[in-house]
Each structure stands twice: as C-alpha cells, then as structure tokens.
Image (cartoon, grey):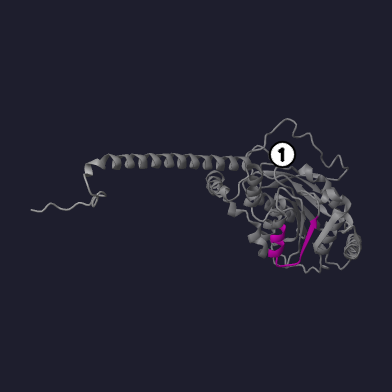
Amino acid sequence: MDTPYTYSPLDGVSGDNSLLTPLAGQAQRTWRRWVGRVAFASGGLLSATIAGSLFVVDAVTRASKVTSFDTYTFTPFELDLPSEDVQIPAIDGDTLSGWWLPRPETDRVILVCYGYRNRKSDMLGIGAALWRSGYNVLIFDYHGHGEHAGTRVTLGYRELEDALAAVRFVYERVPSARLGVVGFSMGASIAIMAAARDTRIDAVVADSPFAAQRNPIIMRMRQRFHLSWSGRPVLFFADHILYWLLGYRFSDVEPIRDMARLGNRPIMFIHGMKDTVVDPSDSELLFEAATGTKELWQVQGAEHCGAYFANRRYYVKRIVSFLDRALRDDGVRSAAIEEVELEQQEQHDDQDNNQKHKDNGRPRAAVLGMRLIAFPRLHFVHPHRTGH
C-alpha cells in the first residue's frame, strides 16, 4: 500500500536533507522570537495607549479641589449691584447656586454661561455691564464648578443640563422673558446646544466656542505631547473610558451638529485669532453652519476669550448692540446700536484707507486691532416662542 505523500518545505532540495534540518529549526526559533518581541512591543504600546487615554480622561474630568479659600471671592456686593442669591432646581434633584441681578422694569434677560473650571464670580464684570445696559442677568454655577466643586466635570455634557435648568428658572421667574444667552469657551458651546434644545432662547453670543468637544482636547494633546495622527488611538480608548466612567462620548458634545436647529434665531460668534485653547477655525465652522442671522467678529492678537480684554468698553457696546437688536421688538433703536454702527463705519473707512495708504509696505493697523469678517446690517425676525 502506498504511503500518503506529505509536502515538506525541503522537497526538491538536492542532497542530504538531514543537513538542512538544523537550519530549518533555527529559522523557526528566530521567527518565534520575533513574534514574541512584536507581541511584547504591541502589548507595551497598547498599555501605553490605554494609560495615555486614562490620563486624558482624568485630566479633562478630574474634580477641582475644594479649599477653605474658595469663598474668598468677589460677589455683587463689591460692585454695588442689586442682587438676589437664588437656588436653581437641577434635573438630578440638586440645586445650583446663582445670582439674579434684577431689572424689574423689563422682561429682557441675559443668562451668562462661563467656561471650563470657572466660577460665577468670574462673570461679574460682564454681568455688571449687561445689567447696567438694562438687562436682568442670571449668573450661576454648574455641577463640579464654583460652589459645587468637588465632583467630576464633563466639559459641556452635564453642564448643558445645568444651563437648561437655568433657562427653566428664568421662565419661572419672568414668564414673558425675551432671553439671550452669553457664553464663553465651554459656556459658549453650551449656549449653542441649549438654544438648539430650548426654542425660548431668542439669541446667543458665543465667545470662543469649540465646534466639538474633542477639538480642544486634540489641540492640547498636540501642544503637550506633540502628537498628530498617532493620538487617534488615545482618543479612541478615551472615548470608551468616558462612556464607562461618566456615561457619555465625545460625539455627545458637538455644537456643530446643533447649528441648524437654531433656525433663524440670531447668533454672534467672537474669537481671538491668537487663541491657543480653541482653534479660531472652530468659530468659522460654526458660523458657516448657522442658517439664520449670524455675525462673526474675529479679534487680531487676542488669546482665548481675549476680545473683552482687548477693549472692554467696545466689547460691551458691541454685544449690547447685538442683543438690543435681537431682543427688542418695539422698534426703538438703542444708543448702543447707534454708537456701534458709527464705530463700524469708522472701522470700515479705516480699512479702506489701509488699502490706499501704505507705510513702508505695511498697511496701518485697523482701529482697535480688530478684523471684521462678517458684519452685515442685521435685521432680526423674532422666531415663534414655544413653551411660554
């Protein structure tokens, strides 16, 4: 009976095959060693990636430390502002602390949303300016921030629910409110997402918003670790860790996806062109995605949320002019509108002169160092309010 043929890698090699057997064994051992090394390196790389992901998640969400000095801060008292300490019911049954700066003669209200790891006292400057401009103002603390520090923060996920709770509080307080939201950084992104979810918000001012939560995280990773595409695996695992730890993913905080839901409600974007925290292109993307009345104000030389500090007086005039247009329905033109329109014309004239007159090959600096990307004469149509 014939023996079944079994193929051997050494078939067809002339001579004594026994001489080649040690060589074949050596090759197999070398191959196994390389497989082991690759597996070890891969395991090490995977471990390093997961460790990096854990670091990113912890850095983003880590609870702020609570100290005995946290209450040593400014309040409306120091600015001689009339105010009321209020407690805002949150969706989880907790209450959020806030300050209500009243203007009983009007139903116009501005809700102020601050940025990542800030506190409501940080907003007293702009809050006071808005109050002096004739608005009721509500400033409040999110979970994990200010008076509620000590729990993890979520860079816009849970904080959005807190902002929506503040909106509900406004309408319980002033049922006929004409409401604008002014937000900074994370708070600007929250303002956009809140307006997409509650149509009673009539206008938004978004200073230095991110288009998606992952964007400033990627930017920070590139700055700190010099990672580009190689940081994607870190974000992949960080996304899953976020969901496991806090129940949300990066994709749950993407204002860019909500822009169309604002409809024709007016929105103003502000961004410093030297921003190293949120890329100025994020505001450009959001501006392009907006479908209603919109305005983009880009400030040359300004860092993150730096437009206010570039020229406080003009900043206040600019946003008050915008809000007056958005929230007035009596046809009366405010002084702020007229002042800003005059300054806009002067700036445009200055820009025209820059094109005509050169100084050593360089155009003269524009007024205040600010470049206006999109500044049409705005005409606001109030959307139909629901839920009043």
Q: On the rendered image, what quadrant is the C terminus found in?
A: bottom right
Q: Nearer the viewer, residue 223 or 55?
A: 223
Up-down relation of residue 288 to residue 36 (above or below):
below
Q: Residue, x 23% and y 49% (percent of image)?
A: 14
For the view shown, which residue lies furthest in the left direction?
1
Is residue 14 visible from the viewing direction of this image? yes
| Quadrant of res 191 | bottom right
**Local crowd size for mark 1, using a 10 Å CA cut-off: few (<14), some (14–19), many (≥20):** some
Query: Could you say whether the residue bearing mark 1 is in a helix, strand or loop?
Result: helix
Magenta-colored span:
283-299
Is residue 388 visible from the viewing direction of this image? no
Q: Which residue is mark 1?
A: 147
Q: Residue, x 80% and y 50% (percent of image)?
A: 302
Q: Is residue 296 magenta?
A: yes
Position of residue 335 measured from the top left corner of the image (x, y, whole percent):
91, 61
Q: Is residue 26 magenta?
A: no
Q: Residue, x 67% and y 60% (percent of image)?
A: 196
Q: Nearer the viewer, residue 93 or 150?
A: 150
Position of residue 314 measured from the top left corner of the image (x, y, whole percent):
88, 54
Would you say 226 lies left or right of 140 here?
left
Q: Amino acid at mark 1?
A: Glu
Position of residue 194 measured from the top left corner of the image (x, y, whole percent):
68, 56
How many badges with numbers are in the image?
1
| Quadrant of res 209 | bottom right
Q: Residue, x 79% and y 54% (percent of image)?
A: 110
